[in-house]
Amino acid sequence: MSEPIQLSLGISLNDEATFANYHVVGDINRIVVEALQNFAECKGDKNLVIWGGRGSGLTHLLQACARRTHSVDQSMQYLPMRDLVGYSPIQVCEGLEDLAFVCLDGIDEICGNAEWEQAIFHLYNRLKDNDQRLLIASHTSPPALPIVLADLKSRILGSTVYHVEGLSHNGKSAALQARAQNRGMELSDEVTQFILNRAPRDMNELFTLLNRLDDASLQEQRKLTIPFVKKVLCL
């Protein structure tokens, strides 16, 4: 596997977060992925907001977009807001308007924080003045975001908005098996259903469990059977 792209503030991108291994089910998410691919290559709208429930793959999509931007030699910065809310917003946002692409993952995390709302509002304006791009992800629909600063709320609502649909049970099964196959693992239908029926349904957590199974399988040279999965994951 390639090394993760090292960003400032100690942030790195997951090397598995690519468009190629994002499991698309249905036309709606396919449209979202196409829009993000264009966005990463500096095509189409310059301000995008994507939103969806937890586990719908927002972080995966944003990091895939950031990785694609980097691959076409454009400057970018990915910012996971949950991890940065305790930092000085002025310092975090300083100079970002000089980049081709800025990504704010989880704007929900700073709603109601006056300093952060002001900083992002001013960043939005500076990026617009420099003809640069801003991508925002939210687990709350944009109209329902509890943002206090009216000017920031209007900027977000004025962006192009896409809704990312969560996977159905069958979709999660297919995504889990596809990720396993990409890692060189054989995950049968029976074992997949065993995991889905007993583990958390959030795809991020499911992929984390799959990583644990991969490590354990390699260490013990065991196939992924129900008894082995039950033992490793304590299900």
Image (spheres, rainbow, N blue to C red):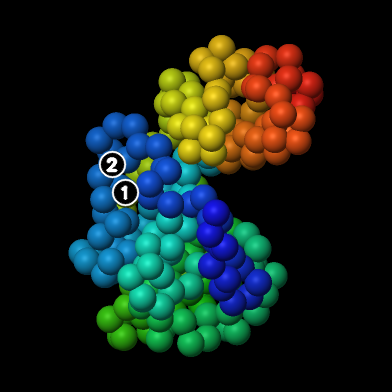
Judging depth in this view, the residue of 229 and 222 nearest the camera is 222
Q: CA distance from mark 1 to mark 2?
A: 5 Å
Mark 2: give few (<14), some (14-19) or many (20+) Cα within 10 Å: some
The residue lying furthest to the front in this view is 221
Task: Identify the secondary structure beneath mark 1.
Answer: helix
Q: Residue at x 40, y 37 (%)?
A: 23
Q: Position of residue 36 (x, y in %)?
A: 32, 56
Q: Are marks 1 and 2 in contact (CB under 8 Å)?
A: yes
Is residue 167 toward the left or the right of residue 209 in the image? left
Q: Is residue 100 above or below residue 3?
A: below
Q: Is residue 11 above or below residue 122?
A: above
Name the image quarter holding the C terminus: top right
Judging depth in this view, the residue of 17 and 54 nearest the camera is 17
Mark 1: give few (<14), some (14-19) or many (20+) Cα within 10 Å: many
Q: Residue at x 51, y 50 (%)?
A: 16
Q: Which residue is mark 2?
A: 30
Is residue 154 toward the left or the right of residue 229 in the image? left
> In the rendered structure, which amino acid carries the disc numbered 1?
Val
Judging depth in this view, the residue of 234 and 81 nearest the camera is 234
Q: Residue at x 60, y 17 (%)?
A: 191
Q: Position of residue 77 (x, y in %)?
A: 48, 73
Name the image quarter holding the N terminus: bottom right
Is residue 120 toward the left or the right of residue 200 in the image? left
Q: Residue 203's image quarter?
A: top right
Task: Identify the secondary structure beneath mark 2.
Answer: helix
Q: Position of residue 178 (x, y in %)?
A: 46, 32
**Residue 53 visible in rendering:** no
> In the rendered structure, which amino acid carries the disc numbered 2?
Arg
Q: Residue at x 65, y 72 (%)?
A: 10
Q: Which residue is mark 1?
A: 33
